[in-house]
Amino acid sequence: MQITKFWKWFFPVTSIFLVLGCNHVDEMTPRSFVSMAVGELDQRRELIADALSKGKVVPIAGPLTLGANEKIKLLPIDFGWVTSSGAIIVHSKKYDVIVIQEPHVSPQKVTWSCVVYPVEAKPKLCGT
């Protein structure tokens, strides 16, 4: 009887302590920051690739502006820039990372390279 009462309360009480003791915000690593930033910049890469494939000027060249409804606004970006050649540069002091995504134009398509410093923060979605 005593053992049944113990197990009945053990899991709920333990779960409460685990939830209160774990802060999900602290679990973001530089690699996860880069993954989120690269994922959120997908629409911008498509816009740039479309312009470059048609031989047009990159329409969003300049400071990387973030819309009010974009999730990337929640990411601590200290510097963001889109160059006239279409490269996207993102820097975060909090996670101490720099991400550079560079387009390579060929007659068939536009491919992207991803450079991350420090290299340890480079996620698999950036390629090798």
Image: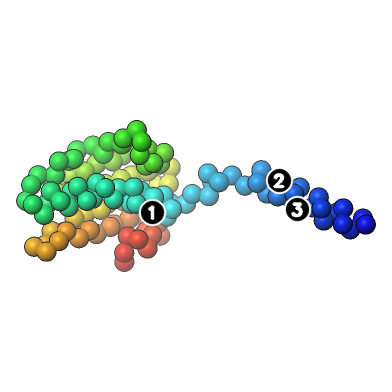
CB within 8 Å, label 3 to label 1 = no
- Of 95 and 73, which appears nearest the observer? 73
Residue on which the image places disc 2:
16
Inter-mark Cα distance, 3 to 1? 34 Å
Q: Residue furthest left?
A: 55
Q: Quarter-wise, where is residue 122 in the image?
A: bottom left
Q: Residue furthest top?
A: 68
Residue on which the image places disc 1:
35
Under mark 3, the amino acid is Phe
Residue on which the image places disc 3:
11
Compared with residue 110, is residue 56 higher up or lower down, i.e. above or below?
Answer: above
Compared with residue 72, is residue 53 higher up or lower down, i.e. above or below?
Answer: below
The reply to whether residue 76 is in sight is no
Q: Residue at x 65, y 46 (%)?
A: 19
Disc 2 vs disc 1: which is toward the camera? 2
Q: Secondary structure at mark 2?
A: helix
- Of 7 and 31, which appears nearest the observer? 7
What quarter of the picture does the N terminus occupy?
bottom right
| Residue 40 place in picture, x, y as percent | 34, 47
Q: Residue at x 9, y 44 (%)?
A: 57
Side of 55 relative to 33 (left or right): left
The reply to whether residue 31 is in sight is yes
